[in-house]
Amino acid sequence: MTLVIVGVVSLVGVIPHWRRGNVNLPKALIFGSATMMGAFGGAKLAAHPLVTETFQLVLFAVLMLVAAIFMIRKSQERPQSASTEKTALAAYPAPICKYCWLWLLTEGIAIGILTGLVGVGGGFAIVPALVLLGKLPMKEAIGTSLLIIAFNSVAGFLGYFDQVSLDYHLMVSFTFFAALGILLGSYLSGFVDARNLQQGFAYFLMAIAAFILFQQRDTFRSSKANSYLPEISSQVLLQKTR
C-alpha cells in the first residue's frame, strides 16, 4: 500500500519538474530498469520466512536514521552564493571509475531491493547517484529521481500483489490526501526557510525511527532469551544423565 502511495505522490511531483525540463528520460529508463528489477526482487524476498516484520521495521528505522543524519549535515552546510546555481553536490569530487554506468546499475539494483523490502523511495540515495555517476545537474537529478521512484513503486507493488491482501479504501484515501499534501507543501515551501525545514524534518525522522526501535524492544529481548534456551536445555539434559 505504501508503494502505491509513494508512486502516485512521486508522479504528482514529477509534473512541475517535467514542465521545467528537469527530467532526463533516458537516464530514468536506464537507472529505473535496474531499480525496478531490484524492487521486484526485494518484494519477493520479503515473502521469505527469514524476513520477519521485525527485521523490516528495524531496517526501515535504520534507513530513516541514515537519511536524517545526511539531511542534518546538509542543512548545516554554508549556503552558496546567490550568483551561482551550483549545489553542494557540485563540490564533490568526480567519481574515479572507468565504467560509471555499471556502478549506476549496481546501485540501482541495491536501492530497488530496499524499496521492495521496506517501501522507501530511496530518493536520498538516487539523487547523489544520478549526480555523481549519471553526471546530471542537481535540479535534473531531483526531477528524474521522482520518476525513478514511481518506477520502483510499480515494480515493488507487482511483487507484493499476489502475496498480501490490500485495503483499497484506505489506500486510495491516503493516496488522495498525500497528493494534496505534496501540492500544499510545494506552495508552503516558498514561505519557509529550506534549511530549517530540512533540519526539522530530519529530527522528525529520527524521532519516528527511535519510536519504531523502542516498540521492538520486547522482540529484541525475547530473541536474546531464546538464544539461551539451547544452552540451558543442554545443561539440564547433562545434569539428568549424570
Image (cartoon, helix red, strand yellow):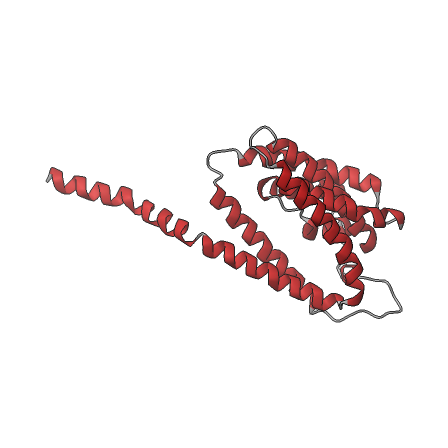
Residue drawn at 55 percent across, 34 percent down: 45
Q: Residue furthest left?
A: 242
For the N terminus, give its image quadrant. top right
Residue drawn at 75 percent across, 65 percent down: 194
For the C terminus, give its image quadrant. top left
Horizontally, residue 137 falls left or right of residue 154, namely right
The number of callouts visible is: 0
Q: Is residue 75 above or below residue 134?
A: below
Residue drawn at 63 percent across, 62 percent down: 202
Residue 117 in view (yes/no): yes
Q: Is residue 111 above or below residue 155?
A: below
Q: Position of residue 130 (x, y in %)?
A: 76, 48
Residue 110 in view (yes/no): no
Q: Is residue 134 above or below residue 40?
A: below
Q: Position of residue 93 (x, y in %)?
A: 75, 58
Residue drawn at 47 percent across, 45 percent down: 54
Q: Position of residue 198 (x, y in %)?
A: 69, 63
Q: Position of residue 124 (x, y in %)?
A: 68, 53
